[in-house]
Image: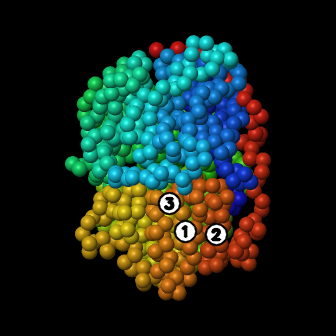
């Protein structure tokens, strides 16, 4: 995979399934390198495989589809260039889509009421005079912000107190079927300064449940509860009163029970989040304690579905498992889960309807394909990864296990170019640390392997996917067991003669950037390094990061000597390894000062080093930044490695202007063969859901 092959990525979102189970609709996104933006359209996919997937909408950025319970409507979000996403409605029997909302900062995902005549969603409500709500008053002319809370900003969002997210309900008028009938104005249901998210309807339509943090310690702890409120904004009540972090509530068909995805217990102070795992839980809708349906010591939800999906007397959940994400059906009574998808796959999202489960499943050759699951059968429905695969530049991962010095098993993967080698090696370290590498198409790994590098990746202690004890093993000990695990896996990988043990680079982002800087401060074994968007120093992190109020204390502790031992800055004066530092200028998770301090320390001492800064980007640059910034990032990474670890593929051809040496990006952007030409009817057999 070359950097310009980013244009070939096709990334399906979470699907929606029609009430009769005959049709799935999914948003498929792609980076448009020429326009420097993302494009996304909705695709209709018959679940029986009787016809190929086809484009359904032709908007610029269409996403999060939702079928009405009677099957007559498809609600979704759409945005044109420079605009915020708004709620749109498409009749499934044919007709033009209609815009329903006009929120200044955009609307959130639609959630249908059981009567198919009302929609709930959340939207941020800006304070008057800010965010362009007054013509002629730009950001620099707004009044000052008086901050009185600890949690006042969030990476990729910005300041919070002057634009809280609120629940809205929109009624479709009785004559809305008439194309000339205007939509009604949405009604704001919740109030206050606390964010309200994850809204859902009770089956009788008389109450909404949502998630918020409104308790007295909300500014200090990490607890979030489920609340209920009537659609007219009355009767607000708290359902859960826990020490946990609740999300994504959903009622059972009777309305008497709620299912939520929750970290059940964050400790007495509501702050002990380290490797605490989220699992489906049951709670009485009238109020009560959380009852986990899976053991949170062993299981952790890892899918991207923005809901808890209730089906057949249980719930569906994607569970992280040693680099995979399995799909389970967990019985409501806490019985033995049924495995629907396992193996070398990552289940990214799913939906159910009419007895059919549709899941988006990724693997090491595709960012996601739709499969339909019915009793006794699984059917592949799409080939969105085909065009990238046809380039011949997608490489298979090979699974390996190493043994740490204390005998602990370390699981990971090695990906190599074709041929006998030996290849220079890149040790890649993931962020988190409570995250996992695994079975999915990772564009960075593919690009490095295509450039002639063997890429070594593992999930050391501290990672997710191996149980709570594995994740909590590094609490109070950054740079100890995790560093030992990573180096043990590298040494095991280097026993393969195809890997050049004398030419090894190390790289990582966020926590991976931390461990990269930590390792080169204590060893000179690496030829060069790249530390990206890194957590470097816990002392300054406390006051500068959007999570600085809890992260260092909980992970590293508060003892000054232990903090110094775990800080990447402590031994930075000993670094001699050539290092590229990459950072985004608007990163509020690991702020710019973290990377800048590392770079200045190296530069002052004459260590070969560079600082690559991306304007207008936050912490998620490498995954969701502007397409041209993602392209430039990959080009600079390969330029750096070509300088210090040249390969036959890049030596003599990779220059400071790497883009000039690579083909132009694809411009047609088809998925899989044609662009949507316009909205087409989506025929569904309507089935009433009581």
Q: Earlier in the sequence, mark 3 or mark 2?
A: 3
Residue at 71% across, 59% down: 4
Residue at 64% across, 39% down: 79
The residue labelled by disc 3 is 587
Q: In this rendering, does residue 146 appear at all?
A: yes
Q: Quadrant of the N terminus?
A: bottom right
- Looking at the picture, tell me which residue is in the foreground, 8 or 183: 183
Which of discs 1 and 3 lies nearer the camera? The answer is 3
Residue 470 picture location, percent across and down: 34, 57
Q: Which mark, residue 582?
A: 1
Judge left or right: residue 671 versus residue 314: right
* Disc 2, SS: helix
On screen, 188 above or below 37?
above
- The Cα–Cα distance between marks 1 and 2, rounded to whole angstroms, is 10 Å
Q: In this rendering, does residue 389 appear at all?
A: no
Total tally of numbered discs in the picture: 3
Q: Are marks 1 and 2 in contact (CB under 8 Å)?
A: yes
The residue labelled by disc 2 is 636
């Amino acid at each position: 995979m070359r950097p310009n092959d980013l244009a070939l990525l096709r990334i399906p979102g979470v699907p929606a399934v029609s009430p009769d189970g005959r049709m799935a609709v999914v948003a498929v996104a792609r980076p448009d390198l020429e326009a420097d933006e993302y494009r996304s359209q909705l695709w209709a996919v018959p679940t029986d495989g009787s016809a190929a997937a086809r484009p359904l909408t032709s908007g610029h950025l269409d996403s999060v589809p939702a079928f009405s319970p009677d099957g007559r409507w498809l609600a979704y979000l759409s945005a044109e260039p420079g605009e915020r996403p708004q709620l749109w409605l498409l009749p499934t029997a044919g007709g033009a889509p209609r815009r329903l909302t006009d929120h200044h900062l955009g609307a959130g995902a639609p959630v249908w009421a059981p009567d198919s005549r009302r929609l709930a969603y959340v939207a941020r409500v800006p304070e008057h005079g800010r965010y362009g709500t007054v013509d002629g008053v730009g950001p620099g002319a707004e009044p000052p912000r008086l901050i009185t809370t600890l949690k006042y900003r969030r990476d990729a969002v910005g300041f919070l107190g002057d634009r809280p997210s609120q629940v809205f309900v929109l009624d479709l008028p009785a004559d809305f079927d008439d194309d000339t009938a205007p939509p009604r104005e949405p009604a704001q249901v919740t109030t206050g300064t606390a964010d309200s998210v994850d809204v859902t309807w009770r089956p009788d339509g008389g109450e909404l449940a949502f998630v918020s943090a409104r308790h007295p310690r909300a500014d200090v702890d990490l607890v979030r509860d489920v609340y209920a409120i009537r659609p007219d904004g009355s009767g607000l009540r708290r359902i859960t009163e826990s020490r946990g972090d609740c999300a994504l509530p959903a009622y059972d068909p009777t309305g008497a029970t709620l299912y939520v995805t929750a970290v059940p217990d964050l400790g007495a102070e509501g702050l002990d989040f380290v490797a605490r795992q989220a699992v489906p839980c049951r709670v009485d809708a009238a109020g009560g304690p959380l009852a986990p349906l899976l053991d949170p010591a062993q299981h952790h939800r890892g899918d991207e579905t923005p809901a808890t999906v209730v089906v057949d007397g249980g719930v569906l959940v994607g569970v992280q498992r040693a680099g995979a994400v399995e799909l389970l059906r967990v019985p409501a009574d806490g019985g033995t889960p049924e495995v629907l998808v396992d193996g070398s796959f990552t289940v990214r999202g799913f939906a159910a309807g009419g007895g059919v489960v549709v899941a988006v499943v990724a693997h090491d050759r595709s960012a996601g394909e739709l499969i339909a699951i019915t009793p006794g059968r699984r059917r592949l429905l799409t080939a969105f990864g085909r065009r990238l695969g046809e380039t011949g530049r997608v490489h298979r991962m090979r699974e390996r296990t190493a043994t740490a010095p204390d005998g602990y098993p370390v699981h990971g993967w090695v990906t190599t170019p074709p041929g006998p080698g030996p290849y220079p090696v890149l040790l890649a370290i993931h962020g988190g640390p409570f995250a996992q590498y695994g079975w999915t198409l990772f564009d960075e790994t593919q690009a490095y392997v295509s450039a002639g590098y063997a890429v070594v990746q593992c999930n050391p202690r501290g990672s997710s996917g191996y149980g709570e004890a594995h994740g909590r093993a590094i609490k109070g000990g950054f740079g100890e067991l995790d560093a030992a695990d990573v180096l043990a896996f590298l040494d095991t990988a280097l026993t393969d003669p195809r890997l050049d043990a004398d030419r090894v680079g190390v790289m990582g982002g966020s926590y991976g950037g931390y461990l990269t800087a930590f390792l080169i401060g204590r060893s000179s074994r690496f030829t060069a390094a790249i530390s990206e968007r890194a957590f470097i120093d816990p002392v300054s992190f406390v006051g500068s990061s959007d999570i600085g109020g809890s992260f260092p204390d909980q992970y590293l502790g508060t003892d000054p000597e232990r903090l110094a031992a775990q800080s990447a800055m402590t031994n930075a004066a000993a670094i001699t390894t050539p290092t590229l530092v990459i950072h985004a200028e608007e990163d509020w998770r690991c702020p710019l000062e973290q990377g800048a301090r590392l770079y200045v320390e190296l530069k002052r001492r004459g260590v070969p080093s560079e600082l690559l800064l991306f304007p207008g980007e936050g912490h998620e640059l490498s995954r969701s930044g502007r397409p041209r910034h993602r392209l430039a990032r990959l080009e600079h990474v390969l330029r750096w490695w070509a300088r210090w670890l040249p390969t036959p593929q890049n030596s003599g051809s990779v220059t400071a202007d790497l883009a000039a040496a690579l083909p132009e990006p694809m411009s047609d952007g088809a998925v899989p063969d044609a662009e949507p030409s316009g909205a087409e009817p989506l025929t569904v057999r309507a089935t009433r859901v009581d």
